[in-house]
Image (tube, grey):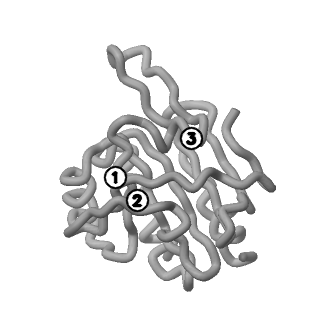
Amino acid sequence: MPPSEGETVPDFASLLCDGETFRSTPLSDALGARGGVVVCTGFAFSAIARNWWKRFVRAGWDEFDGVPVLGVSRDGPYAQNEFLRWLDRPDFRFFADVNGDVSEAFDLLGERSHMANVSTPWRSAFVLDPDREIQYAFVADDWISPLPVADIGTAVADL
């Protein structure tokens, strides 16, 4: 069962990409002074991810003060960095979850029936305080639902 509000997420470590470099980084070190938003998506250059992340830019998520937006995707660090360059938002960063360890820690991995031997995280977002406690959680129950951008923005403002 994916974590819910009030729970503390594990302090995983994975390669954190910034558009140019990548370095193994614990989640606790990637969070800002007020916390962070963790957004899980299947693959960086999927049509859904491209649509979502452009929507986050339009919503002003790159301007959260002390609250970084951290993507999690099954792509490797080179693809993650290329996606961040395409997005042209140096304030967003992505964890490369190649083996699915991060998604598994959040209990989000789902088998994709139309993709042989492939599992991806359910599309989801978690607003965390600086201690990794979930203040807001959303996990889609299908593969295409958009995130509730306004609700997430409100949860960030309440940090």
Mark in front: 2 vs 3: 3
For image coordinates 27% across by 54% down, the residue present is 80
Using the rendered view, name the quadrant where residue 148 is placed: bottom right
Q: Amino acid at mark 3?
A: Ala
In which quadrant will I find the N terminus?
top right
Q: Is residue 119 above or below residue 28?
A: above
Element at badge 2? helix
What residue would you read off at disc 2? 53
Residue at the location (35% across, 16% down)? Answer: 117
x 51%, y 26%: residue = 110
Residue tagged by mark 3? 105
- State the residue position of label 1: 50
Which residue is pictured at 32% across the width and 48% down the height? 44
Q: Nearer the viewer, residue 73 or 59?
A: 73
Give the camera-side residue of 7 and 24: 24
Say if mark 2 contacts mark 1, CB within 8 Å: yes
